[in-house]
Image: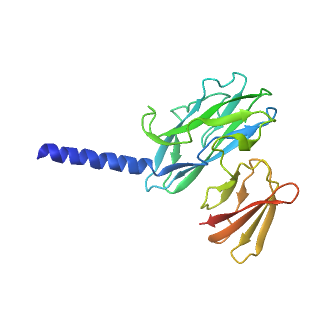
Amino acid sequence: MMRLFTRFLSIVFCLSFLQINAQVTIDPQSLDVVVNENTMYTYNLVISNKGATDVEVYWVIEKGSDFPNSWKTTMCDAELCYNENFDKIDVRRPNILKANTNLLFKIYFDPSGLKASTTLQLKLYGDKDFKNLLAQTKANAAVIADNTVSSSNIKGQEDLLIYPNPTEQLYFIKNDASVNRVSLYNVLGKEIKTENHFRGASHDVSALNNGLYFVRLYDSKNKVLKTLRLNKK
């Protein structure tokens, strides 16, 4: 009987552990990208804690074995901007992700003029020993620096999307290389505001009432690329 009870407690603990882990998310969920080899690219990553307790977050950047030596990445978490190609957090400086809040991480990627391709992944851990995995981006996400390659050629490349969604303050646009302007509409079709957009830019909706909105994305020729739903909370 005691053995069964002990096993039951072990199962409950494991389930609780998984539930806690499931509360931390990364948005967007993939680091897939195609860039001009002469252009720096910025990943804007929204780290969210949807749980009821605060979490310590420790990060690791995992690069493909063929990641070129001349390529550079710079991680800026909520505490510090690290030196180039520093791929693991200083465990003395964990990020505190409070319950029901977000943190913004940025990874600056500089191909340094070299055409190449490799993979890139971000992993988040809940301990300084890097054993308790909280969340991770897609494994083997393709990172290509080559101005002759279209982003549509990446297998699994995500379409245009906005994140985080729902949001309380800011939203970003994934795969935004072709986006030149954004317009925000309410559910009645009334235009709320229009803003110019550049790659990696954020848009502030903190002053809006909570509810459903529509974001229309335009290219440089004023062609509508896509209209997306945005939930303001």
Please give the count of numbered marks on the rendered protein.
0
* Rendered position, 54 above or below 193: above
- List the single residue furthest toward the bottom: 188
Q: Residue furthest top?
A: 69
Q: Is residue 53 left or right of residue 228?
A: left
Q: Residue 136's spot in the image, x, y percent?
A: 53, 41
Quadrant in the rendering for residue 77: top right
Q: Residue at x 16, y 46 (%)?
A: 4
Q: Quadrant of the C terminus?
A: bottom right
State the image quarter where residue 138 is shown.
top right
Q: Residue at x 12, y 45 (%)?
A: 2
Residue 1 at what x, y percent from top left? 11, 47
Pick whichever, 152 or 228, lies toward us.
152
In the image, residue 29 lies at what x, y percent?
Answer: 58, 46
Query: Looking at the image, which is closer to me, 126 or 112?
Result: 112
Q: Position of residue 50 (x, y in %)?
A: 49, 56
| 61 w.r.t. 179: above or below | above
